[in-house]
Amino acid sequence: MVQFYAREAISSDMKIINREEREAHAKYLATEGAKGIFYGSILSVGLFNFIKVRYPAKFKLFSTSIKTCILILPTIGCCAFWADRGSVVFDRRMHSYGGGPKILEELRKWKAMSTYEKTVTVVKDNKYKILIGTWLGSIYGTWAYVESNKLMDATKKAATIKRVNGGSTGVFALALASCLLNERLLNGFISPKSDVNK
């Protein structure tokens, strides 16, 4: 009888983790870690260029190691923070909120997908991050290219940056509006049939 109650107590405190749950946990951590890398990269590039523009004299004195740290440390920190937070959220969803069966079912569906289907799913689920990342990347790329061009004076550089960034912002706005409209159509907020009947 004592052994029975001891086993019950241990079972109530311990979380029995099977292979599927480990895989689901690893997948969730990888997803959250990728989010951390995305946001950390934006923070790193922003901080790097802020220091470079705001304090050019001090920036020139920085060694390669310091510049590398400015770019890498925020990214690593954000990745670790998001992954750690993701682990806590996963545990709550899996064990505290009764979402375990749904999480495991989503994992089975994911494993049954082909590589193409997985790629489409990832792009679809992260389309806004991809759009924002592409937009910010184009702005930074334009700025870095123009700043490195020694044949342009300050006026030409400013005009080129303004023109290219204006175009990329316009494309970004159109793509964002298209994604939002598509979501509204898929979610049933706008009925295409009703528009046709009108």
Image (cartoon, rainbow, N blue to C red):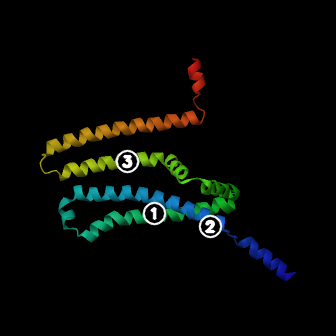
- Please tell me in which quadrant of the rendered image residue 107 appears: bottom right
Per the image, label 2 sits on a secondary structure element best described as helix
Q: Which mark is residue 22?
A: 2
At x 24%, y 52%, the residue is 144
Q: Which residue is mark 1?
A: 79
Residue type indicated by callout 2: Arg
- Mark 2 and 1 residues: CB-CB less than 8 Å, in contact? no
Q: Position of residue 157 (x, y in %)?
A: 18, 44
Q: CA distance from mark 2 to mark 3?
A: 33 Å
Lateral position of residue 135 relative to residue 154, left or right? right
* Between discs 2 and 1, the one toward the N terminus: 2
Foreground disc of the pair 2, 1: 2
Per the image, label 1 sits on a secondary structure element best described as helix
Q: Which residue is mark 3?
A: 134
Q: Quadrant of the N terminus?
A: bottom right
Q: Position of residue 69 (x, y in %)?
A: 32, 68
At x 70%, y 57%, the residue is 101
- Please tell me in which quadrant of the rendered image residue 38 appears: bottom left
Q: What is the crowding at mark 2: few (fewer than 14 residues within 10 Å), some, or many (at least 20)?
A: few
